[in-house]
Image: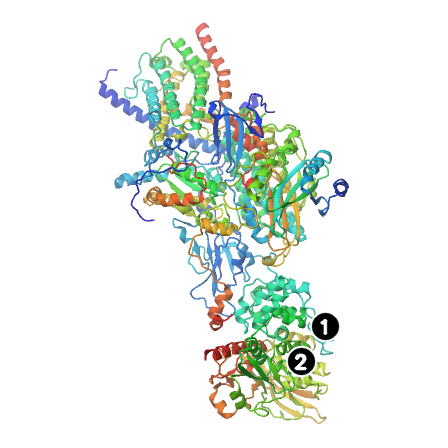
Amino acid sequence: MDNKEINNTKLANEGLSEQDRPLFCDARPQSYKPLGKYVEKFLNWARANSLWILGYGTGCGAIELRPLMTARFDMFRWGLAPRPTPRQAGVFVIGGYMSVKTLKRVIRSYEQMQGPKFVIGLGSCTINGGMYWDSYNTINRLDHYLPVDIYITGCMPRPEALIAGFNKLKEMIKAGETDGQNEYARNFDWYKANQKKIVKDWNMPDYNW
Amino acid sequence: MEHGLFISIIYAFISLSVATIWGLLLGGIALKVVARAHGRFGPPVWQPIIDIIKNNARRTSISHGIMYFLGPVFRIAGGMGTFLFIPFIFGSSVFGNFSFAGDLFLVMYFIFFGQLGMALGAGESGHPYSAIGVARGLSQMTAFELPFALSVISLVIQYGTLNITSIVAAQQGGLLSWTLFTNPLATIAALISLQGMNMHNPFSIVIAPQEIPIGPPTEYHSNFLGLLQTNRGLFNIAKLALFMNLYFGGATNIAVMILKTFLLYMLTIFIGASFPRFRTEQSIRFFLGVPTVIGILAVIVIAYL
Amino acid sequence: MKLKDYLSPFYVWKRAFDKPFTTRKPLEDRPGAPRYRGFHQNDMEKCIGCGSCEVICQNAAIDLVPVDGIETTRKDSGLRPKIDYGRCCWCALCVDICTTGSLKMSNEYIWIDSDPEVFRFVPGASEKPWKNTEAGYSQHENYTLLNLDRIDMPMLTPEDSRKSFIETVKGYSKEEAMKEAQRCVECGLCVATCPAHMDIPDYIRAIRDDNLDEALRLLYDTNPMPATCGRICTHLCEDVCSIGVKGEPLAIRWLKRYIVDQIDDTRFKAILRDEFKPNGKKVAIIGAGPGGLSAAYYLVTAGYSVTIYEASDLAGGMIRYGVPEYRMPYDQLDQDINYIKELGVEIILNNRIGKDTLFSDLYNNYDALFFSTGLNDPYKMAIDGESLPGVFSGLQILDDVTKGIKPDIGKSVAVIGGGNVAMDAARTALRLGAESTLIYRRREEDMPADTEEIHEAHAEKVKFITQAIPLRIEKTANGKLKFIWNNAEMVAKEGAARPSPIAIEGDIQSLEVDAVISAIGQGADYSFLPPEYESKIKFKRGKVIINENCQTTVPKIFAGGDIANPTADAISAIADGHNAAKGIDKFLNKK
Amino acid sequence: MSDRSKFPPVIDGKAQFDLDSGKYIKVWQGPQHPGVTGNMALELIISGDEVIDLTTHVGYLHRGFEKLMERRRYIQCFPIVCRICVPEPDTNEYLLAAAAEELAGIEIPEKAKWLRTLTLELSRLASFLMWIGGQSGAFGMGTVAQWAIAQRDFILDLFEELSGGRVYHMYIVPGGVRDDLPSGWDKHLEDVLVKTEKMLKEIEIVMFNNVIFKMRAQNLGIITPDMVDKFGIVGPNARAAGLARDLRKDEPYLIYDKLDFQVITRDFSDAYNRTYLRWQEMWQSIGLIRQIMAGMPAGNDYHYNLPNVLNWKIPHGETYVKAESTRGEYGFYMVSDGSGYPRRVYVRGPSYTHAMALLPHLAVNVNIADMAGLMVSLHTYPPEIER
Amino acid sequence: MQEILNKLIDRYAIEPIQENRHNQAFVTIEKNRLPDVLTWLRDYEDYTHLAFITAVDYPEIEKIQLTYMLHNYILHTDLGLRVLLDRTRPEMVSIHHLWKQVATYQRELREMFGIDFPGSPGLQENFALEGWKDIPPMRRDFDTKEYSEKTYFPRPGRQTHDPKEYMKEKLYPSAKEDK
């Protein structure tokens, strides 16, 4: 998973029908270089202090996002806010286990998010399958399908653990250590192959622009 | 306009910046105030500013076409247009902006302009939610424009001028000369419209995250969204400044301006946190009901009594 | 719509003046509750690596791994649970089931990393912030997922049992056996301790599944005398049973007996399906005790032609002659022996090597030789009066009773010693109509006899005198014997494993009895070995030195049983027999 | 009743319409839609603002629980069943335990019954609070949502103290419960109940007396009594239509026959009345919790000592046990084949019929903006549909 | 409870009957009679509530059992109707006309057990799974663990030890090669 040569061929979009294909973009995701040191530092500060979470509770982990968003834990204090549309969101909290059907939607949502984007793997299920390790319908390892920045273990992690996770993510962003978007671009073919292996009816564009 | 063009532009720029920053801070304050009603603390007041920086710092953005790109541009043009023809602070050369004889008309037009541009842009994003949102937004806007327009007509008749500066000037000389007291019906009609204009509850269905996420800005992101948010700060202030000028005697210095816009804004927040949303047709029915009647009464009262 | 409906919503603003719901600093202000199920802790000293946590974990989150600094011992597998937090669901079933109570959960719950590979650790071994946290979830008294109490074994009452030689222990019924078998957690710690390494968890599982045929096959895999072992085994396995840490260990021995009890011995052949092809090689075995019989069984099933030479008039060795019938009914022993005989093992009785047959003949006529002659030479007490009439050895008494000779012990006996033979002798004496008094040098807890034996001896009203150092035996005027001893106190010596008795000066006691039975241990009798062989075979402290294949220093000669192993019990002898059979097979097939 | 006269004809349960005609738009709500409680997608066909056809799509949370349970020992099933319904896990725990106990012929100690009832009522309260937050949020009243969900969190604190888990309590195990009440817990409970009561009063003032809430919720999604059996409607949805059906009263389980309460009904089942009924049931729950705490037996016999759970086998048989969850009849159908593993566990979630059959029927003719409110007012929870 | 069972026996000669508790019983019914019985129970005997329909797979007898659970709200009794289907090509009469929710149950059963209900609306649509190619997952012969490990491959690097084997290795390695 190191820096491979970027493959610049056009995407085939094979899952789409003939007449739909021209409607969708066939360009690959590109990796981005940081701007000048101090500029980037400032921008990273802003990114870290304004994390917009995609309001897609993909699993039971979403249950602990609710208290976090509401008065008891009030995540707005730390610049976190839920966003109902992936276009505007910057953090994708994967709420635990992911069924294949959800994974397909998650991939699409993730690709619709604009960089820099971060993924938090919430709960044990994202690490090694968790309690659904032997289920026929849930994936075991999230990092095979999406680049994950932070894992928070727990079942479910409490809101405090989530807060600590966000704090850690902020530190990483400020230090410029989060590179999910570029990693996805660099290893795009690998991720796509993994995704397509388990999403059986791939009827969407290869990369959603 | 006794300055040269260059100086005017610099003044306008300063005025715009101050207004935008104040608008954004006001938004932040509003979030904090609402948070208290929710029983929590809320984000820092400068959070909207960080959000804008963040949105502009996004590395990628996608354009769905020219109109999509122009949407936010129209929007901010609308915001700037609205603001720049409203005297921000009465009598100030820096914040006086480009008030001229017929500016009230122009401002009314600009309030529409941004929304229409936005509608076109959002329409091109191709998202069905945007389309539904645009439909909701435009129909609701038409509805709340009616009482507001009636109220303005009433004012125009009352003061006999289309110049905002003149209207402000006419209200100087004590609390009781404010339109609020000289023409309360028009003020009430306008304030109700303001609630709709600010898109706070119960008129927030256009950008509601529950009733379909989230309306016209569904597809807007990165710097487009940054532009929209900047405009939200600016446009807010523009509207508040307009209302302050038309109904609450304008402002002669920054402190008064801050106080009056703050209080006006808090009024909408106060209502907003207490109510759920109207559905589109419910809000249209609402605006075309009592507020319109009040507006008509305001015109009649001023014109015939 | 009423006016109230327009105004009352503004009541929300009242909340703005109340204290907010928000916790100011959630990370600092809100530790987990005292019972919170957070990350695991494990007391490395307490844990025995039984793996019950691994079995019950429905997420397959627990692995048992070796840990530096933890040695494998008989009571501890040396493995420790390693938990994968990519799997754990914090249900705490592992804590509930833990057989030792070593596994706990702290109330810490935050563990964040960007590397998914790190979320595994061995609680107790890895330095984690929650290693020593006090609060957290642990086992409770009133809630356990295990059955810690043994199913009571139906037994004769002590009053009845002391009257006859009828077997004291009645054996489990099916229902009781199933219930007892259900208690097993299948950790397998017992297997290493069992000298024969029997597949204990497997045959217990077979009992649970009510598949006794399979159970019998499993028994015969490692032990050809299950009916015997089901009664008189020293059950070292029960000492290390993981259920025994918090509760009573499984009655492994009785479950074994249950299997054999339920199966008619005529069906053994059909069940065991022992089929073999004779390979034409011959092996001679000296001594038809458990070691010899066991070796014979495994050799004959490997195709050897086996002949056993036995000095007594019946096979069984010490089990027959050294264990009283109320513990080991002879028909059960015969059942075991008969099955071995049925397979074609020839047992030549009343044939003492060195007297009736020469050792060298055997050495020359057979391809290999195995002797397991046992310890049948009682130790002397080395006190005055030991040779007086009325002083017997324990073995002598037991031997006589087996042979149907009623020894002349009168109405009261003193039994000297604290081992199983002493218990047997004392209880046999009861059944012969005498009052028994047991006299032992150390404390009761130091006695080498099985605790059950001691317990039953107490129940049958054997009197115990402990911390008594024998001084001499005197003949009294009325023809009785006077056993005189010196009371002792236990003094802990430096470097010694246990305290030793030191005589208290002047505190001398005595007891008048009809007979004195000395049962302080036995030694081996190597008189059958001609000197030329005896010089070649190496000994150490009276025991034959053998390698892991039970081979002596003379390649063709194998040995085992009490004369070779340190534990000197039936199951070890059986294990030696098995090993010797494997060793002989290896030895003969190498050529 | 929904008037379908202006809508396209329905053949074989499917509305016949031509999307290419331009008269209709197809819009998806969900699965990530925040107005949806849990991940469930609504495929809407709208004409203008009105929904003319709705199809519910589930499976986003499908984990195959029933399959997983087939390869787990009875005791190992208990940590996974609570994940079926996240806001109210205790019903699942109780039903699994009850089914296993019934088949195994185990009678649990009295104290365990009281403690189980206590957790069931407490989780009912928590679940309702979560739901009322969703209901108000669905109509845009974020304030009540903030209050209610924060208040629910205090109940989770109680659960944390009692069971050691915040969301997944895993407190009710086959054979009883895991632990006694911690000391001082009753005081904390009373504090929280008092606060909850205060908040419920506030909610009544700002929500049920709110002109806009009334405008939105009244006459939305009307369930008539004759629909109830046809659609398999249970719980508050049926009670709001005037049918006094409550398993706690009808077939009392645990200690409900010792508690004093009345089944709450209303005579018109629209979104407003359903909301109000659930609000009343929250009061009822608080009352029940107080009664339970007052009657809690002393002693600490709260668990029947099962056979070693690793080897616990349950005799042949099948049974269906049920309990009244916040959403209605919740049931576990368990078939045992005499081994240590269940042959089949089927989970009957009340949301199944509500979301899959009732919602598409009620959605017709509803403004698309009211869809979220309608859905939440049925109190559906997707994981119990697909499990 | 006994009353309705007697009626069932009289009317449909149904046996065997398994009575669980005072208010619950299970009866086995011949496949083709089920719609009649259901309709009769629903319309005349107040068993108006259909709690669920589900299936149990019995590969050892080559049957799939369908269970229809009815409830009587007046007597508060449960009646489970069992139907045994042939396992190789299970097919059952659709009863979607009796209750509105039935179509979904049948859709689920088709997906999870591979039972066909000819005529049931939307039967071929996916229920919970998407693009499922394997045998229906709820069949007993589908091994979910094997499928998961093959498809979603667990994170490598784990190794466990059996205490029994490990102790053998450590304490008496000589006996290792035998057996």
In the image, residue C26 above or below residue C351: above
Q: Residues within 10 Å of mark 1 (few under 14, many from 20)?
A: few
Q: Position of residue B95 (x, y in %)?
A: 30, 21
Residue at point 44%, 31% (across, down): B33
Give the CA separation, mark 1 to mark 2. 18 Å
Judge by depth and name the residue closer to the eye, C88 or A136: A136
Which mark is drawn over residue C157?
1
Instruction: Name the subunit of mark 1.
Output: C
Quarter of the figure with the C terminus of chain D: top right
In the image, residue B169 above or below residue A205: above
Q: Amino acid at mark 1?
A: Thr
Judge by depth and name the residue closer to the eye, B207 or C191: C191
Which mark is drawn over residue C517?
none
Residue B226 found in image quarter = top left
Regarding mark 2 in the picture, which secondary structure is present there? loop
Q: Position of residue A142 (x, y in %)?
A: 42, 46
Q: Which residue is mark 2?
A: C324
Contact? badges 1 and 2 (CB < 8 Å):
no
